[in-house]
Image: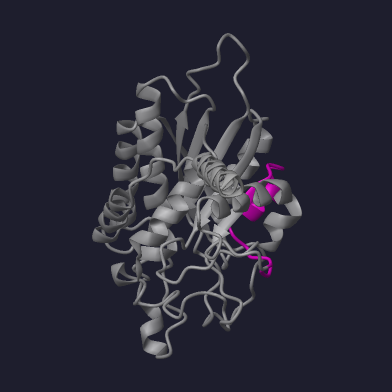
Amino acid sequence: MKKILYLLTGCILLMTACTKKQAVVSRPSFSCDSAYAYISRQVSFGPRVPNSASHMQCAVWLIEQLRACGAEVELQKGFMPDYRGNNQQIYNIIGHFSSVCTSGNAAPARKLLGAHYDTRPWCDEEEDYNDRFYNVPGANDGASGVGVLLEVARQIGLRMADSALSTPVDIVFFDCEDMGTPHFYTGAEREDTWCLGSQLWATNYVKNNGAPYAYGIVLDMVGAPDASFPLEMYSSQYAGNYQQQIWRSAEQLGYGSMFTKQQSYPITDDHYYINYIAGIPCVDIIHYDIRNATGFPHWWHTRNDNMDNISKATLQAVGEVVMSQIK
Protein backbone atom coordinates (compact mmCIF):
# COMPACT_ATOMS: atom_id res chain seq x y z
CA MET A 1 0.00 0.00 0.00
CA LYS A 2 2.86 2.39 0.88
CA LYS A 3 4.47 1.75 -2.50
CA ILE A 4 1.19 2.62 -4.22
CA LEU A 5 0.86 5.82 -2.18
CA TYR A 6 4.44 6.81 -2.99
CA LEU A 7 3.77 6.14 -6.68
CA LEU A 8 0.60 8.23 -6.68
CA THR A 9 2.37 11.04 -4.83
CA GLY A 10 5.17 10.96 -7.38
CA CYS A 11 2.72 11.13 -10.28
CA ILE A 12 0.92 14.10 -8.73
CA LEU A 13 4.21 15.94 -8.16
CA LEU A 14 5.28 15.22 -11.74
CA MET A 15 1.98 16.50 -13.14
CA THR A 16 2.26 19.62 -10.99
CA ALA A 17 5.82 20.26 -12.21
CA CYS A 18 4.75 19.85 -15.84
CA THR A 19 1.84 22.25 -15.30
CA LYS A 20 4.16 24.84 -13.78
CA LYS A 21 6.65 24.41 -16.62
CA GLN A 22 3.95 24.99 -19.24
CA ALA A 23 2.67 28.05 -17.39
CA VAL A 24 6.06 29.78 -17.78
CA VAL A 25 5.27 30.68 -21.41
CA SER A 26 2.91 33.63 -21.25
CA ARG A 27 0.86 34.31 -24.35
CA PRO A 28 1.31 37.92 -25.53
CA SER A 29 -1.72 40.13 -26.10
CA PHE A 30 -2.64 40.36 -29.78
CA SER A 31 -5.94 40.50 -31.68
CA CYS A 32 -6.04 38.82 -35.07
CA ASP A 33 -9.49 40.37 -35.64
CA SER A 34 -7.96 43.83 -35.29
CA ALA A 35 -5.04 42.95 -37.59
CA TYR A 36 -7.46 41.55 -40.16
CA ALA A 37 -9.52 44.77 -40.05
CA TYR A 38 -6.35 46.83 -40.61
CA ILE A 39 -5.53 44.72 -43.67
CA SER A 40 -9.05 45.00 -45.06
CA ARG A 41 -8.93 48.78 -44.66
CA GLN A 42 -5.72 49.03 -46.67
CA VAL A 43 -7.15 46.87 -49.45
CA SER A 44 -10.27 49.06 -49.55
CA PHE A 45 -8.13 51.97 -50.75
CA GLY A 46 -7.31 49.96 -53.87
CA PRO A 47 -3.80 48.95 -55.02
CA ARG A 48 -1.27 51.17 -53.21
CA VAL A 49 0.92 51.73 -56.25
CA PRO A 50 3.53 54.38 -55.37
CA ASN A 51 2.35 57.96 -55.90
CA SER A 52 -1.18 56.94 -56.88
CA ALA A 53 -4.21 58.43 -55.12
CA SER A 54 -4.80 55.14 -53.25
CA HIS A 55 -1.19 55.07 -52.12
CA MET A 56 -1.33 58.62 -50.73
CA GLN A 57 -4.69 58.04 -49.03
CA CYS A 58 -3.31 54.93 -47.37
CA ALA A 59 -0.16 56.78 -46.26
CA VAL A 60 -2.24 59.49 -44.57
CA TRP A 61 -4.34 56.82 -42.87
CA LEU A 62 -1.24 54.98 -41.62
CA ILE A 63 0.10 58.18 -40.09
CA GLU A 64 -3.22 58.72 -38.33
CA GLN A 65 -3.25 55.17 -36.96
CA LEU A 66 0.28 55.40 -35.57
CA ARG A 67 -0.47 58.71 -33.89
CA ALA A 68 -3.66 57.28 -32.40
CA CYS A 69 -1.50 54.55 -30.82
CA GLY A 70 0.74 57.14 -29.16
CA ALA A 71 3.64 57.21 -31.62
CA GLU A 72 5.63 60.26 -32.62
CA VAL A 73 5.42 60.03 -36.41
CA GLU A 74 8.11 60.99 -38.87
CA LEU A 75 7.58 61.14 -42.63
CA GLN A 76 10.84 60.47 -44.45
CA LYS A 77 10.85 61.73 -48.04
CA GLY A 78 13.41 61.24 -50.77
CA PHE A 79 14.09 59.89 -54.25
CA MET A 80 15.50 56.60 -55.50
CA PRO A 81 16.09 55.44 -59.11
CA ASP A 82 13.82 52.66 -60.35
CA TYR A 83 14.68 49.86 -62.80
CA ARG A 84 14.73 52.32 -65.73
CA GLY A 85 16.79 54.90 -63.86
CA ASN A 86 13.86 57.24 -63.28
CA ASN A 87 13.64 58.80 -59.83
CA GLN A 88 10.76 57.54 -57.70
CA GLN A 89 9.39 59.64 -54.86
CA ILE A 90 9.69 57.74 -51.58
CA TYR A 91 7.51 58.23 -48.49
CA ASN A 92 8.68 56.13 -45.56
CA ILE A 93 6.44 56.37 -42.49
CA ILE A 94 8.17 55.97 -39.12
CA GLY A 95 6.42 55.64 -35.77
CA HIS A 96 8.63 56.22 -32.70
CA PHE A 97 7.44 54.64 -29.46
CA SER A 98 9.59 55.93 -26.59
CA SER A 99 10.63 53.96 -23.55
CA VAL A 100 8.76 54.96 -20.39
CA CYS A 101 10.33 52.67 -17.78
CA THR A 102 14.07 53.44 -17.68
CA SER A 103 14.24 53.74 -13.85
CA GLY A 104 16.86 56.48 -14.09
CA ASN A 105 19.16 54.42 -16.31
CA ALA A 106 20.08 55.08 -19.91
CA ALA A 107 17.37 53.98 -22.33
CA PRO A 108 18.05 50.52 -23.82
CA ALA A 109 18.78 50.09 -27.51
CA ARG A 110 15.66 50.38 -29.65
CA LYS A 111 14.03 47.61 -31.59
CA LEU A 112 13.06 48.05 -35.22
CA LEU A 113 9.91 46.58 -36.78
CA GLY A 114 9.17 47.04 -40.47
CA ALA A 115 6.90 46.14 -43.38
CA HIS A 116 6.24 47.64 -46.80
CA TYR A 117 2.91 49.33 -47.52
CA ASP A 118 3.18 49.76 -51.30
CA THR A 119 1.86 47.23 -53.81
CA ARG A 120 3.35 46.01 -57.08
CA PRO A 121 2.27 47.99 -60.15
CA TRP A 122 2.25 44.88 -62.35
CA CYS A 123 0.73 41.40 -62.00
CA ASP A 124 3.73 39.95 -63.78
CA GLU A 125 3.14 36.42 -62.49
CA GLU A 126 -0.18 36.16 -64.38
CA GLU A 127 -0.24 33.50 -67.10
CA ASP A 128 -2.17 35.73 -69.51
CA TYR A 129 0.19 38.43 -70.79
CA ASN A 130 -2.60 41.03 -70.96
CA ASP A 131 -3.35 40.52 -67.26
CA ARG A 132 0.20 41.39 -66.30
CA PHE A 133 -0.43 45.11 -66.59
CA TYR A 134 -3.02 45.20 -63.79
CA ASN A 135 -2.02 46.40 -60.33
CA VAL A 136 -1.61 43.81 -57.56
CA PRO A 137 -4.31 44.20 -54.83
CA GLY A 138 -1.64 43.38 -52.23
CA ALA A 139 -3.67 41.89 -49.39
CA ASN A 140 -0.88 39.51 -48.42
CA ASP A 141 2.09 41.09 -50.20
CA GLY A 142 2.15 44.37 -48.37
CA ALA A 143 -1.01 44.80 -46.31
CA SER A 144 -0.59 41.70 -44.11
CA GLY A 145 2.71 42.82 -42.59
CA VAL A 146 1.43 46.35 -42.09
CA GLY A 147 -1.80 45.06 -40.54
CA VAL A 148 0.10 42.94 -38.01
CA LEU A 149 2.36 45.86 -37.11
CA LEU A 150 -0.57 48.25 -36.69
CA GLU A 151 -2.04 45.84 -34.15
CA VAL A 152 1.39 45.60 -32.52
CA ALA A 153 1.40 49.41 -32.38
CA ARG A 154 -2.03 49.36 -30.74
CA GLN A 155 -0.80 46.90 -28.13
CA ILE A 156 2.31 49.03 -27.51
CA GLY A 157 0.08 52.06 -27.04
CA LEU A 158 -1.92 50.18 -24.40
CA ARG A 159 1.30 49.26 -22.60
CA MET A 160 2.52 52.85 -22.69
CA ALA A 161 -0.77 53.98 -21.16
CA ASP A 162 0.06 51.71 -18.21
CA SER A 163 3.74 52.80 -18.17
CA ALA A 164 4.72 49.22 -18.98
CA LEU A 165 6.93 49.62 -22.07
CA SER A 166 10.58 49.15 -21.11
CA THR A 167 12.20 49.15 -24.56
CA PRO A 168 11.73 51.87 -27.19
CA VAL A 169 10.37 50.60 -30.51
CA ASP A 170 10.35 52.10 -33.99
CA ILE A 171 7.83 50.84 -36.54
CA VAL A 172 8.69 51.68 -40.15
CA PHE A 173 6.35 51.31 -43.10
CA PHE A 174 8.64 51.21 -46.11
CA ASP A 175 7.64 52.55 -49.51
CA CYS A 176 8.49 51.24 -53.00
CA GLU A 177 9.54 47.76 -51.92
CA ASP A 178 7.74 46.12 -54.83
CA MET A 179 9.06 48.32 -57.66
CA GLY A 180 11.62 45.76 -58.86
CA THR A 181 12.12 45.09 -62.55
CA PRO A 182 9.01 43.48 -64.10
CA HIS A 183 9.41 40.19 -65.94
CA PHE A 184 8.22 41.62 -69.23
CA TYR A 185 10.85 44.40 -69.31
CA THR A 186 13.45 43.82 -72.04
CA GLY A 187 15.71 46.85 -71.63
CA ALA A 188 18.94 47.25 -69.70
CA GLU A 189 18.40 46.36 -66.05
CA ARG A 190 19.79 48.28 -63.12
CA GLU A 191 20.96 46.64 -59.91
CA ASP A 192 19.09 46.95 -56.60
CA THR A 193 15.69 47.81 -58.11
CA TRP A 194 13.74 46.27 -55.23
CA CYS A 195 13.22 47.70 -51.74
CA LEU A 196 13.83 51.33 -52.66
CA GLY A 197 12.29 52.66 -49.45
CA SER A 198 14.48 50.58 -47.14
CA GLN A 199 17.55 51.50 -49.20
CA LEU A 200 16.73 55.17 -48.62
CA TRP A 201 16.03 54.60 -44.92
CA ALA A 202 19.25 52.64 -44.37
CA THR A 203 21.37 55.17 -46.28
CA ASN A 204 19.96 58.07 -44.24
CA TYR A 205 20.50 56.09 -41.04
CA VAL A 206 24.20 55.75 -41.77
CA LYS A 207 24.53 59.33 -43.06
CA ASN A 208 22.90 60.80 -39.96
CA ASN A 209 24.67 58.44 -37.53
CA GLY A 210 21.37 57.16 -36.17
CA ALA A 211 20.96 55.88 -32.63
CA PRO A 212 21.73 52.17 -32.34
CA TYR A 213 19.16 49.40 -32.60
CA ALA A 214 19.42 46.09 -30.77
CA TYR A 215 17.98 44.31 -33.82
CA GLY A 216 15.12 44.47 -36.28
CA ILE A 217 12.30 42.32 -37.65
CA VAL A 218 10.73 42.74 -41.09
CA LEU A 219 7.36 41.17 -41.92
CA ASP A 220 6.38 40.34 -45.49
CA MET A 221 3.58 38.09 -46.76
CA VAL A 222 2.50 36.91 -43.30
CA GLY A 223 -1.20 36.21 -43.88
CA ALA A 224 -1.50 33.07 -46.02
CA PRO A 225 -3.63 30.20 -44.66
CA ASP A 226 -0.85 27.66 -45.29
CA ALA A 227 2.01 29.97 -44.33
CA SER A 228 5.49 28.58 -43.90
CA PHE A 229 8.23 30.72 -42.37
CA PRO A 230 11.63 29.03 -42.82
CA LEU A 231 15.01 30.35 -41.71
CA GLU A 232 15.78 32.90 -44.44
CA MET A 233 19.45 32.81 -45.37
CA TYR A 234 20.36 36.52 -45.20
CA SER A 235 18.75 36.64 -41.76
CA SER A 236 20.85 33.66 -40.70
CA GLN A 237 23.98 35.30 -42.07
CA TYR A 238 23.57 38.75 -40.54
CA ALA A 239 21.33 38.14 -37.53
CA GLY A 240 21.49 34.43 -36.79
CA ASN A 241 21.34 34.71 -32.99
CA TYR A 242 18.22 36.88 -33.13
CA GLN A 243 16.64 34.64 -35.74
CA GLN A 244 17.11 31.63 -33.49
CA GLN A 245 15.73 33.57 -30.53
CA ILE A 246 12.57 34.47 -32.46
CA TRP A 247 12.06 30.94 -33.77
CA ARG A 248 12.49 29.52 -30.25
CA SER A 249 9.77 31.87 -29.05
CA ALA A 250 7.54 30.68 -31.88
CA GLU A 251 8.08 27.07 -30.86
CA GLN A 252 7.35 27.84 -27.20
CA LEU A 253 4.11 29.51 -28.25
CA GLY A 254 3.09 26.41 -30.18
CA TYR A 255 3.85 27.67 -33.69
CA GLY A 256 6.85 25.46 -34.45
CA SER A 257 5.14 23.85 -37.44
CA MET A 258 4.67 27.27 -39.06
CA PHE A 259 8.08 28.70 -38.10
CA THR A 260 10.01 25.80 -39.55
CA LYS A 261 13.65 24.91 -39.06
CA GLN A 262 14.20 24.56 -42.80
CA GLN A 263 16.75 26.88 -44.37
CA SER A 264 15.43 28.91 -47.29
CA TYR A 265 17.29 30.58 -50.12
CA PRO A 266 18.41 34.20 -49.58
CA ILE A 267 15.54 36.57 -50.33
CA THR A 268 15.99 40.18 -51.38
CA ASP A 269 13.65 41.99 -49.02
CA ASP A 270 13.79 45.14 -46.92
CA HIS A 271 15.78 43.37 -44.20
CA TYR A 272 18.70 42.82 -46.59
CA TYR A 273 19.45 46.53 -46.95
CA ILE A 274 18.91 47.16 -43.25
CA ASN A 275 21.60 44.54 -42.62
CA TYR A 276 23.92 45.37 -45.51
CA ILE A 277 23.75 49.18 -45.58
CA ALA A 278 22.72 50.16 -42.04
CA GLY A 279 24.57 47.36 -40.26
CA ILE A 280 21.56 46.60 -38.05
CA PRO A 281 20.98 42.87 -37.43
CA CYS A 282 17.59 42.28 -38.99
CA VAL A 283 15.45 39.15 -39.39
CA ASP A 284 12.91 38.56 -42.15
CA ILE A 285 9.69 36.72 -41.33
CA ILE A 286 8.46 35.91 -44.82
CA HIS A 287 6.36 33.16 -46.36
CA TYR A 288 8.52 30.87 -48.44
CA ASP A 289 7.77 27.30 -49.49
CA ILE A 290 10.78 25.50 -50.92
CA ARG A 291 8.41 23.05 -52.69
CA ASN A 292 7.09 25.78 -55.02
CA ALA A 293 8.83 26.99 -58.17
CA THR A 294 8.88 30.60 -56.93
CA GLY A 295 8.76 29.79 -53.22
CA PHE A 296 5.74 32.05 -52.85
CA PRO A 297 1.96 31.40 -53.00
CA HIS A 298 0.52 30.68 -56.46
CA TRP A 299 -1.40 33.97 -56.28
CA TRP A 300 1.75 36.00 -55.53
CA HIS A 301 2.03 39.04 -57.83
CA THR A 302 -1.31 38.27 -59.43
CA ARG A 303 -4.81 39.75 -59.33
CA ASN A 304 -5.79 37.11 -56.76
CA ASP A 305 -3.70 38.53 -53.91
CA ASN A 306 -6.90 39.52 -52.11
CA MET A 307 -8.65 39.10 -48.74
CA ASP A 308 -9.70 35.54 -49.63
CA ASN A 309 -6.10 34.54 -48.97
CA ILE A 310 -5.76 36.05 -45.49
CA SER A 311 -5.95 33.75 -42.47
CA LYS A 312 -6.64 35.09 -39.00
CA ALA A 313 -4.88 32.06 -37.51
CA THR A 314 -1.67 32.97 -39.33
CA LEU A 315 -1.97 36.62 -38.30
CA GLN A 316 -2.41 35.55 -34.67
CA ALA A 317 0.69 33.37 -34.79
CA VAL A 318 2.91 36.05 -36.33
CA GLY A 319 1.51 38.76 -34.07
CA GLU A 320 2.16 36.78 -30.90
CA VAL A 321 5.69 35.93 -32.01
CA VAL A 322 6.47 39.60 -32.70
CA MET A 323 4.89 40.70 -29.41
CA SER A 324 7.00 38.14 -27.55
CA GLN A 325 10.07 40.18 -28.56
CA ILE A 326 8.73 43.41 -27.02
CA LYS A 327 9.20 43.88 -23.30
Q: Is residue 327 left or right of residue 128?
A: right
Q: Quadrant of residue 183?
A: bottom right
Q: Number of callouts in the render?
A: 0
- Does 38 appear above or below 228? above
As drawn, the residue found furthest toward the top would be 104
**Magenta part of the chain:** 263-283
Write the residue at 54% across / 47% down. Answer: 8
Q: Residue 171: image x %, image y %?
A: 48, 40
Q: Is residue 297 left or right of residue 236?
A: left
- Does 149 appear above or below 67? below
Write the residue at 46% across / 29% down. Answer: 97
Q: Residue 283: image x %, image y %?
A: 62, 51
Residue 145 inside the magenta-drawn segment: no
| Front residue of 182 and 234 | 234
Write the residue at 44% across / 49% down. Answer: 319
Q: Residue 320: image x %, image y %?
A: 45, 47
Q: Is residue 62 left or right of residue 125?
A: left
What colour scheme was applied to this rendering of the protein? one colour
| Front residue of 67 and 190 | 67
Write the residue at 35% across / 77% down. Answer: 303
| Front residue of 75 and 246 | 246
Q: Residue 316: image x %, image y %?
A: 39, 54
- Does 25 appear above or below 161? below
Whether residue 173 is visible, yes or no, is yes
